[in-house]
Image (cartoon, coloured by chain):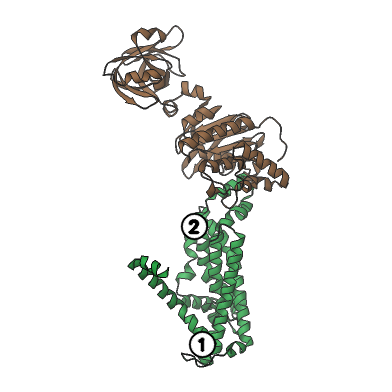
Amino acid sequence: MTARPTMPEGIRVDHLTKRFGAVAAVDDVTFEVAGGQFAVLLGPSGSGKTTILRMLAGLEIPTSGRIWLGDVDATWAPAYKRGIGYIFQRPSMFPHYNVFENIAWGLKLRRLGKAATATRVAEMLDLVHLTGLEDRYVTQLSGGQAQRVAIARALAPDPAMLLLDEPLSMLDAKLRDELKDVIAEVQRRTNKTTVMVTHDQREALSLADTVIVLDQGKIEQMGPPRELYRRPASAFVADFVGHNNFLPVTIVGIGSDGRLQVRCQGQEMLVASSDGLRVGDEALLCLRPDDLEPINPSERGRYEQVLTGRLDRVVFNGDMVRLDVDLGGQMIRVHATGPRRFTFLDRQPETVLLGVGEASLVSQS
Amino acid sequence: MWAKRLAAQTGWAMLLNAYALLLAFVLIYPTIQLLIVAVSDDIVFPPRYFSLAAFEDLSGAFWDSVRFSLLLGAVTTAVLIALCLPTAYAIERFHFRARGFLSAAVFIPFVLPGLGYMAAVGTVYILYAPDLMGTFFGVFLPTALFNLAWMVRAIQGSLATADPVYEEAAMTLGASRLHAFFSITLPHVAPGLIVGAMIVFTNSATAFIAPLFVGRVQSLTATVQIFREMDQHGLTPVLAAQSLLVEAVVMALVLGGYFVSKRHFRGLVL
């Protein structure tokens, strides 16, 4: 463990491309993760996110482009010289070593003394809440515990940065939530520059400082989770991050406050302006089911904009009731939550008023 | 107790037990008969007189052939481990155009009829390297070729079940690829390696066709030496004793090697 400056080092990826034969798994990707930040690469299967992570780790060689870890051009550096901690999707705990030996493995390579190793392993076990399980082998651990050992093992040599490849995807829902908290806590306490790969938008939104959305090897959008959720740059992002209703609209004018006036299924709305959209353009209006609230006529004043639809179907989901609403021939979904959700369960098809919280526009292409 | 257990068994189970016992008997009986002949003073059944004279009458030529056999077994095993480990690794872990060809090529000496293949090797020796005839290397080379497939396949089988993720994890923890291979992957490959080594050592220490074709007096395995003696004098108690000794020495070394490896790769070798 060499002493490093207290400021954590960042990661810079410059025009990175990886081809497997004729297929570009990663296609001219450029991004930066500031020191100490938690970035999440989010995308569907085959979007190139794991390939990017493996290139950051040195487990895959880029076809072109550059990777900077801190101030060092690490594009061609072998994995063992990069000083990164990597957590794999598949269980990777060495089966012929116990928990202690697994965590101490990287320390042994650095010829850390016996006493210092024991202290460091104890620290790591405490960090991932596994103290007392030093002598266990992988067959004696649950999937979540084994993955926590993998986290402790990756962190033990004090790597400059942490790379996680879908670390939660092989676990059941309850363990996933538990381990997600562990990862968030570990990142906060160690302040390590972290890049995690996931296809789960909830994980991405809850853990990341920056989310990088990928599709077919290219970056679709990157930014803070809230921005991505509220201002998706494309229909793909609007659809992949969270749930969304898409309604074809025409931009008919510009409001006094600069917002765009759109006509949607015979009703008019004002929506925050979006890059490249002009009066006369056709676009898609994105209305999240959670940003629509079924209201009584007396509550109209609470919302600046209200849409009128016809309740078509009610689906009980426990903590949320899903309403399918017909908006002038276009079916949209609305999520009713809170104690009022039960009042919708026995409703017959009827007119329903929907208060609009947030809405965004994306171009149709 | 016994009767109770027997009664609890179904007819099928009893049939299978009987089959297992019969098969074991058929497999082991020739060796028992050989032992009886070795400790008799002639070849009749039941034996009339017991004697250990056969074991006292072992020639220097026999012991020379035993030494040659063990050396051949040890060298072939060691060389094949060194050669087949990277070969199996390349076949299993890397993608290259000739991968399928390499995988099939190791089987060539294995699938061709042994006599034909040895005649071919002998022809090559006569034409290009007549000096190899009768030398240790001359016998070693075809013996190793015959056993290549065993070793490659045994290691490959273990490698296929060793997830590459362990090796990658070791590399991200600071180990070079070579270090990761020896400290993480090799223990996983150990079961296959040990099985391969046991088979190859037994095969090569008791090699027959290769030394028969290209061996000379000073380069004969004990198997060929015994065969030649038997060809001249017929089966005698001395030859039975020699055969038994060869079997015992080879088996002891193979089992000894197995138990040492089992202790070394604790938890990975059955």
Marks 2,1: beta carbons within 8 A: no
- Counting residues from the start of the chain, the first of labels 2 and 1 encountered is 1
Q: In this view, does A279 lie above or below B214?
A: above
- Identity, as a three-letter code, of the amino acid under mark 2: Arg
- Identity, as a three-letter code, of the amino acid under mark 1: Val
The answer to which of A271 and A84 lies nearer the viewer is A84
Query: What residue appears at the point 68 percent right and 48 percent down from the top-left corner?
Result: A108
Q: Is residue A285 above or below residue B164?
A: above
- Which residue is farthest left? A349
Instruction: Give the residue number, with chain letter if any, for mark 2.
Output: B99
Letter of the green chain: B
The image shows residue B80 at horizontal and vertical percentages of: 57, 66
Q: Describe the element under mark 1 as helix, strand or loop.
A: helix
Quadrant where the image shows the N terminus of chain B: bottom left
Q: Describe the element under mark 2 as helix, strand or loop.
A: helix
Q: In this view, does B222 lie above or below B143?
A: below
**Taking the image as drawn, is residue A100 in sight?**
yes
Q: Is residue A242 left or right of residue B74?
A: left
The image shows residue B239 at horizontal and vertical percentages of: 54, 87
The answer to which of B143 and A341 lies nearer the viewer is A341
Q: How far apart are marks 2 and 1 (CA)?
A: 51 Å
The image shows residue A309 at horizontal and vertical percentages of: 31, 16
Instruction: Give the residue number, with chain letter if any, for mark 1.
Output: B37
Chain A takes which shade in the image?
A: brown
Neighbor class of circle 2 (other Cα within 10 Å; few <14, some 14-19, many 20+) is some
The image shows residue A158 at horizontal and vertical percentages of: 66, 38
